[in-house]
Image: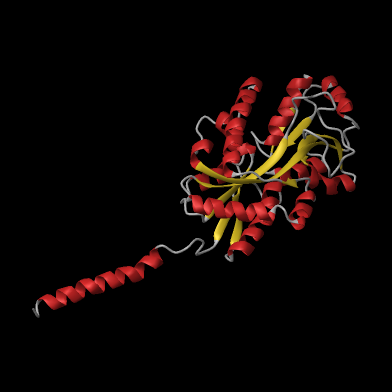
Amino acid sequence: MSSFLPARLSSAALILAAAAVAPALAQPWPAKGITVVSPFAPGGASDLIARTMASKLSEALSVPVLVENRGGAGATLGTAFVARAAPDGYTLLVAGQSSLAFAPHLYAKLPYEPLRDFAPVMNVALGPYALTVNTRVPAKTVGDLLKIARSKPQALTFATSGAGSVSHLTMETLSSSAGIDLVHVPYKGMVPAITAMATGEVDMMFADLGLVEPMVQAGKLRVLAVSGRSRSSAAPQLPTMVESGFKDVVGEGRFGFLAPAGTPKEIIARLHGILAAAVKGADVRERFAKFGYEPTSDTPEQFAALMKAEHERFGRLIRQLKIKAE
């Protein structure tokens, strides 16, 4: 009897110990800080949107939510980093069409597959791009610009936020539709590209409307049109590219939150709820408007369906225009 008691007590102790350890091994999310990856250089729309929403997530979850910039290679470097991250809700991505819809058709070997490697959470922002020129280019309208380009093939240069970006694909679509020959100069992000255009290093680009506004006010840049499906509420006086005669030149910046595939649905649902509530706020709308964007929202399922549709649509366009990553 005495020899049996220690073993029985030992087993009971093990059970109690296991019960004590279990809660520690299954801590409620989030139990630590969260990283939001912006796959572009600091200061661009992706970065500003990421920081705006990160502050809302931090406020709602009561943990630090930090934005980490991992720019380069058409936003694929930062996107690949999140694709490889643990699906535990502690690493998120703010991305748009560049790395999700364009890159699979531009790079022979991409280290991730957008439709397989991510769990969409929600789109948060949508905004048109603006066809912008350095003021040394004597063009006041889209028609003026095309006359110059046609009279001097390869004389005009255009900047982009990277090969295979929205700004790149939109300008290539215009070049093809209008029959003009331009020289592409890619940069590692929207802000460096706009700075180069403002200093005269390049002649023009499709850029975030809000980001070029200070340079427009300073007299260094001129906006000719916007590439949204309709006129921008931030600048209703500007015509669209469709109104200017180019129905296929529609380029819109769209940014959404994603997590690595396999992230628990409960975490995705909680993130979605916080983001959906945040974009309804007047402060978010006001901040987004400063760089030409409007808050938007959808469900994870709608986001997934949109990613699939854009993957197919832009794949056809890239093959048609024979665009390659540089």
Colouring used for the render? secondary structure
Query: Can the viewer see residue 234 in this picture?
Result: yes
Q: Position of residue 83 (x, y in %)?
A: 50, 45
Q: Residue at x 84, y 49 (%)?
A: 214
* Image: 204 above or below 146: below
Marks counted in the figure total 0
Is residue 148 or residue 281 the one in the foreground? 281
Q: Is residue 46 left or right of residue 311?
A: right
Q: Residue at x 62, y 32 (%)?
A: 310
Q: Residue at x 62, y 56 (%)?
A: 274
Which quadrant of the figure contains the C terminus? top right
Residue with the most extreme front position: 1
Q: Is residue 90 left or right of residue 292?
A: left
* Image: 281 above or below 75: below
* Image: 41 above or below 227: below
Q: Is residue 287 left or right of residue 38?
A: right
Which quadrant of the figure contains the N terminus? bottom left
Q: Is residue 260 left or right of residue 50?
A: left
Residue 174 sits in which quadrant?
Answer: top right
Q: Position of residue 197 (x, y in %)?
A: 79, 40
Residue with the most extreme bottom position: 2
Q: Residue at x 35, y 68 (%)?
A: 21
Q: Position of residue 282 (x, y in %)?
A: 77, 56
Is residue 279 or residue 134 the one in the foreground? 279
Q: Position of residue 110 (x, y in %)?
A: 51, 35
Residue 230 sits in which quadrant?
Answer: top right
